[in-house]
Image (tube, grey):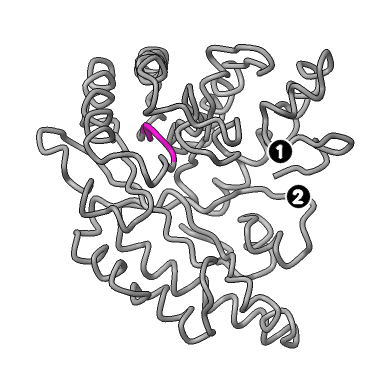
Amino acid sequence: MKPALFEGTTATDEHSLCTALGAKAESVMRRHRETFITRDDFKWLRDRGLNAVRIPIGYWLFNPEPPFVGGAEVLDQALNWCDEFQLAANIDLHGLPGSQGPEHHTGREKFFRWGKEDSYLKRSLEFIEQVAQRYKDRSCVRLFSIVNEPDVDLPAAFLKSFNEAAYDLIRKYMPPERVAVVIAAFTEARLPEFHRHLTRGKNVLTDIHPYACFGKWSADQLMDYVHWGRDSKVPALKKAGPEDLICGEWSLGVAGTLKPAIQALPPDQQDAMMRTFADGQLLAYNQTAGWFFWSYKVESLDPFARDCWCFRNAVERGWLPASFS
């Protein structure tokens, strides 16, 4: 999101960045958190008719362990702004103890002990209860996403058991009439394994991340994708019942093979193509319980890639609607 933070280091994630920063880690990370997203950003979203924000967090905000820098007050402040601007909050557990996959967005790339060592599952459930108890009286918290993109090779039985345990812990503090529990189907090929498996649960949504930026597609195939026609997986999404699906992440990122062709178009044709791409996705995702664009703010990529992944830039460029009300 902010490559400038990593300048002068070989870091690839938050863990290695904090290691590289050493004694400066606390001041650098606190300064970043105080300035990268501010009150004005929440106001900007409200002014354009958005009604919810997804806030990704790592366990170390609440339970810091070296080299990570804690900071639960950052989430507290974000929820205060949600209250102020009448935005619903989706608390998204993006990094669990032990890392739920090998990707950098878990906070620690290539660590991936979650699901392999019992201690990390225990700590993860303790973390979930800690968050639920802390925010049980915050009316803006309307969704609780219990794990982001668990590794595709994790056994279904393990993940189902985790979903059930997490659900029970959350329901001790957050009632179903106020807060939805969001479970993951990652990738969406695993939707039949998880969608509606929590039969005793109430107000449970299944999270999918239907990105269109992977694979080798033509422009026509890209348009097919956004109308739920990509391949056998996507009709399965529609069959699953979109009313209790939620698109936790999507973007205007396009497959690498198609990107040069779009960039080569004259500016007016490029904008028209990207607006069509955005409209098609919105038409599809508006059939679900809701959606969240990934991400609100991205810096320092090439202009086209930045605008594909930065919600605010895509709106201001005219690829996305000026108002969502």
Q: Give the main secondary structure, helix, strand or loop, of the magenta stretch.
A: loop
Nearer to us in this view, 216 or 2:
216
What's the magenta region? 144-148
Residue beneath label 1, please? 12
Location of residue 315 by image quarter: bottom right
Q: Which of disc 1 and disc 2 is earlier in sequence?
A: 1
Nearer to us in this view, 6 or 120:
120
Q: Relative to 286, is 4 on the left or the right? A: right
What residue is shown at x 61% (from left), y 82% (from top)?
272
Q: Is residue 199 magenta?
A: no
Q: Nearer the viewer, mark 2 or mark 1?
A: 1
Res. 299 mark: 2
What residue is shown at x 19% (from left), y 65% (from top)?
239
| Residue 8 horizontal/vertical position (percent) | 89, 36
Q: Relative to 308, is 85 on the left or the right? A: left
| Residue 201 horizontal/vertical position (percent) | 15, 33
| Amino acid type at image mark 2 | Glu
